Amino acid sequence: MIKYLIKYLSVLGLLCGVCYGAEAAELDAVKAQTAHVSLAGYTNTEAINTSQDIQVIIRFEIQDKWHILSPEPGDIGLPTTVEWNLPSGYELIKEKWSLPQVFGEAPFAAYGYGGQAFYLATIRPSNEVWRKAELSAKVSWQACAEECVPEQALLKFEIPIVEHNVMPLPQWRKLADEAKQSFSVSAKNTAHNETSAEASIGMVMMMAFVGGLILNLMPCVFPVLSIKAMALMKHVQDTKLARREAILFFCGVMVSFMVMVSFLAWFRLSGESVGWGFQLQSPWFIFILLIIFIIITLMFLDIITVNVPLINKLAKVSAKTQQLSSFFTGVFSVVIASPCTAPFMGVAIGYTLTQPVYMYYPVFMALAVGYALPFTLIGLYPQVIGRILPRPGKWMETLKHLFAIPMVLTCMWLAWIWCTQVFALSDNIEKADVQSQLVWRPYDQMEVDRMVNAGQNVFVDFTAKWCITCLANEQLALNTPEFAQLVKDKNIILYKADWTNRNEQIAKALAQYGRNSVPLYVYYDGQYKVSRVLPQLLTTSIIQKNIN
């Protein structure tokens, strides 16, 4: 009896030892490593039964002081992605990621992972593949510290196919529990996110306000300055009238911005991807704007006087109440200013348009106040201008004729845009510019990524023909011998992303950098795999400083 008991206990002990060894042993992993991240891929079974789903976990181990961005990075940066190449008939049915942390402060905040992160995929097999299944996952991410570096790795799984049911490996449970904990919400992260969101609204509104102030100095506002300057000089001696017109101008600007942001919100809720200046991507809108500017130009030159009954009636009302002219000058100024994006303004708008719709209105209201404030203050205190300018007289007629010059240039610019949109005229892309010998290629994000990963330096110009700031930067900085020499010395490949007409690829590329408007200039360093966003106003020295 004792003999059989000892034999039984020995067998039991051996089984326990085997089970313990199975639990203690680590799962076999498919591994890959880059400069800043180590990857390990695990499957829940050692074999595949085609009637059972298979699960794969990828664990990211991130170098100290570095972090990678999440699949939804937020304000700026490239998302982490997993692209599966599966056997015929196999289907990816579910994906799950660790909950991200917040890195940085809004509007430059990003969501990502530091230390360790997990990705879980559930894959449904099919019986179209026999004996062995080959699965591969191409993982791409952006590792960030002081600068961001795009990286990628390839994980390949070769798993035999069996006919009997398969059970999850004993070691899988521990790994799955560890991953599951990273998928749950922590109160600390929630509180941090809420505090960050509250702080970001005030900061973004301040940036929008400053951007609105600077917008008055952008080239696209010059035609409106002519119209408003003429109105101010006519009433500079009448303080009461000047103040009334200043308030009405302010109201016109505010109403225009609120109408514009309502359209943006409506497009967003409808699933459309539009950006700042979206109305100028319509040939019909450009054509109507061109007709209006032609009429104003002819009036400035005293070539025509509008003599239409309806307009005369409106003019009489305007003469009595001073409401229509000043209010619609404010409206018109917003329409003309919309092609421009001022410093601070691009980041503020880009951040806002990725947030819930209710955040649109306070941010755009701050932008409107900043834009309207300079002319409003001048109108409220006309005596300051009155001390500088002489009394109204014949000199005003001469000045009006001079102001017709920017109007003529604006008409030529609008006509060029309209012809480009309607007749599909194109720039000499893929052809060398005669003066600077620059070759601009049409934008393609996959081609840009391929060039950078191959170690090539790349410069991308996000532009549009209706963006006067873009055109000014081209003439003053990009189409210059100095820039051409820099391109030659650094062996830079140039890409032009023309957003004159709507383009989903360009809209998505802008969104990756937290922008929703042009101009945007991005330089990719092929050696260090680093991307850098340049300022919106360029000079040759600014470009050289950022690229070098």
Image (tube, grey):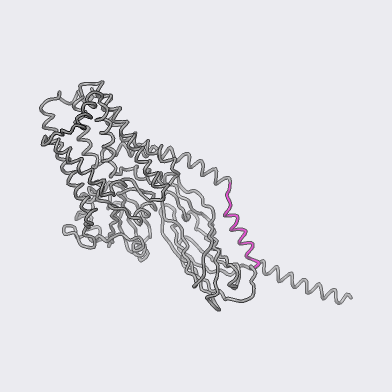
Please say if 342 is above or below 493.
Answer: above
| Residue range highlighted in magenta | 169-186
Image quadrant for the C terminus? Answer: bottom left
502 shown above or below 124: above
For the residue pair 292 and 454, the one nearer the viewer reads as 292
Outermost residue to the bottom: 131
The number of numbered discs placed on residues in the rendered structure image is 0
Majority secondary structure of the magenta segment? helix
> What is the x, y in percent for residue 453?
37, 64
Q: Is residue 548 visible?
A: no
Q: Is residue 174 magenta?
A: yes
Confirm whether residue 130 shows in the render: yes
Residue at 24% over, 21% down = 239
412 to the left or right of 381: left
- The quarter holding residue 252 reads top left
Verify whether residue 61 appears in magenta. no
- Residue 447 image point, x, y percent: 34, 63
- Whole-percent x and y of residue 188? 57, 45
